[in-house]
Image (cartoon, rainbow, N blue to C red):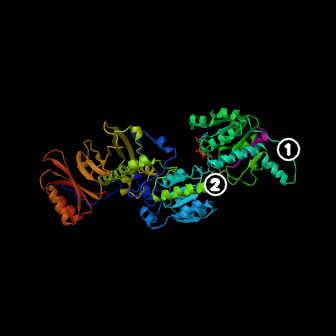
Amino acid sequence: MASTSTKPTFTSPFPSSSSSSSSSPSTKSSNLSFLHTTSPISLKLSHSNSLSSHRRTGSFEVNGAVKTADSPSSVKKSQDLDATSLNSTKPTILVSEKLGEAGLEVLRGFGDVECAYDLSPEQLCSKISSCDALIVRSGTKVNRQVFEAAKGRLKVVGRAGVGIDNVDLQAATEFGCLVVNAPTANTVAAAEHGIALLTAMARNISQADASMKAGKWQRNKYVGVSVVGKTLAVMGFGKVGSEVARRAKGLGMNVIAHDPYAPADRARAVGVDLVSFDQAISTADFISLHMPLTPTTNKIFNDETFAKMKKGVRIINVARGGVIDEDALVRALDSGVVAQAALDVFTEEPPPQNNKLVRHENVTATPHLGASTKEAQEGVAIEIAEAVVGALKGELSATAVNAPMVPPEVLSELAPYTILAEKLGRLAVQLVSGGSGIQSVKVIYKSARDPDDLDTRLLRAMITKGIIEPISASYVNLVNADFVAKQKGLRISEEKVVLDSSPEFPFHSIQVKISGVESKFASSNSENGDISIEGKVKYGIPHLTCVGSFAVDVSLEGNLILCRQVDQPGMIGKVGNILGEQNVNVSFMSVGRTARRNKAIMAIGVDEEPNRGALNKIGEVPAIEEFVFLKL
Ligand SMILES: NC(=O)C1=CN([C@@H]2O[C@H](COP(=O)(O)OP(=O)(O)OC[C@H]3O[C@@H](n4cnc5c(N)ncnc54)[C@H](O)[C@@H]3O)[C@@H](O)[C@H]2O)C=CC1
Ligand SMILES: O=C(O)C(=O)COP(=O)(O)O
């Protein structure tokens, strides 16, 4: 009996307890066009950290079949602003803190820019639902409430600087919102400020200046300490830390550093020894902090660690206030364990009026000025503006914080495979009979390359997108693919099969298998009952090459009709005539059969969608046993 389904109609194929798509944070109203296969894919070279740390080899699983609770907010789908509408309307970019003019110019060349400084959290939340991008510095808290208030419209948050501790990355990811930062342009400014604080503190510059302004001349009170020959411990040997180390060596200091993740050869190149945390803090005369604020570094300098320091140590902090337990520092200053501190950053900014550290006579304080030079602010503004515009245009960002980085040469090689991956996902889900719950998807990549050299995250995201988008309101992109899959209870496992052939192309084929479901086209089942389809990229174009155990060869464009029939002469003509009568153009045809005059599958590519009458007529052809119409 021929199937007469004219178009894929689905009751949710996901397990019912997790199909809460209407309240998903990542609905189709949130969009990053770089994952639309029709949009240009280009990017600058990644500097970020996430590629290697996520790389896996062999067979592995991405998500457990976890049924997540309903998402935290409901999102209005009516506020859709997708790639298409971005082409016709200018995106709105909200800049909530002072940004260099050169960056604003870049932004104005692309979108409608609103600069609204000093917004209260409530004002930010009320504005954000009409914004496609938000640019902040360290003073704006971009928390979950902001993403909820954005109602799915916010596509990118640009942090005009390094530290992203003021942005809720988990919430951003859940809402499919890309977060980018400007990690390089203020490095030198922060390092120079660190050195300025170190020398100013050692020579009591700010205290002496205040004293003179009060009409005094206190030469004996403000005798300082020399820095030459003293040991400086740089805590966090990243971009700023290493620049501080270089400059401190120029001042004749003996520099050591602690950084659990820094390569020893980078430190050696600067003439710095990497040592343990305890060794660094117990031997240093000066300690300069340059690590990010993370759950691990939060209050890492506390009563216990101050107690291990050399009596009379001097501390400089241009990183984040939160890495120091500020009450403990007050105690250490009062007891003389810490002789002086120079602080640019505070747990709460601005600190309250009566803040004991700011008022302490042995503390030199500045109001988070590390990045505040004209040069750094112009640089940061351009860096972030270009990153935000790139993201809004659909490019993968070189400075994305919550999405994988794919270097340009890898991306250009992967581009046709991303299209193949999405189409295979889209095809596979349409083969699932309505009402069955998809829980388990397996992707098999066949390649002659070393599995270590195959980064499949982008392809996995595209397969997830292809599977989820046709049957739910969720919008899936590179940022939120794994999250949305998990939320839907969809478990995707991947396997890389190494072939003994030419490694010229990254993949020989990609196979998508869905297990534990009923197929609406039984011939798509493999021997063990899984729905199974396979595709290849041929001459840069994605092709479907296998359906169940039938080999076919059709380019994945337009729409597809799959028919199973008894192999006999005249079948192509019969079906072609039915479609021709309805003015449906056949773009290609391919027949795969098990044996001569045995069962065969005919794959027919059609430019237009045939009407129900045409599909019924195909179903009435006696030799056709089943067929299905699929939208690509
Ligand atoms: N005061 C200001 O205006 C500015 C402050 N900053 C802050 O300075 C810090 C460093 O910035 P960059 O050097 O650009 O970042 P980075 O990412 O290049 O360097 C941070 C380094 O800290 C290391 N690290 C992480 N956890 C650590 C731990 N537990 N102990 C020791 N090291 C650890 C990392 O391995 C990395 O090498 C950030 O917190 C940033 O927000 C940066 C620019 C301006
Ligand atoms: O880049 C950083 O991490 C900074 O701390 C600079 O902050 P700001 O942009 O000056 O508010």
Describe the element under mark 2 as helix, strand or loop: helix
The residue pinned by badge 1 equals: 221
Left or right? Give the position of 629 relative to 571: right
| Above or below, 558 relative to 257 | below
Classify 607 as above or below 229: below
Q: CB of mark 1 within 8 Å of CB of mark 2?
A: no
Q: Which residues are magenta?
A: 333-345
Residue 76: x %, y % from top left: 46, 63
* Residue at the image point whose x is 63% and y is 48% from the top: 188
Task: Tell me residue 546's x, y (percent).
Answer: 26, 47
Query: Is 271 on the left or on the right of 207, as rendered?
Result: left
Q: Residue furthest front?
A: 250
Residue beneath the point at 21% across and 61% down = 615
Does the magenta segment cover residue 340? yes
Q: Is residue 141 visible?
A: no
Number of the front mark, 1 or 2: 2
Residue behind mark 2: 375
The mark total stands at 2
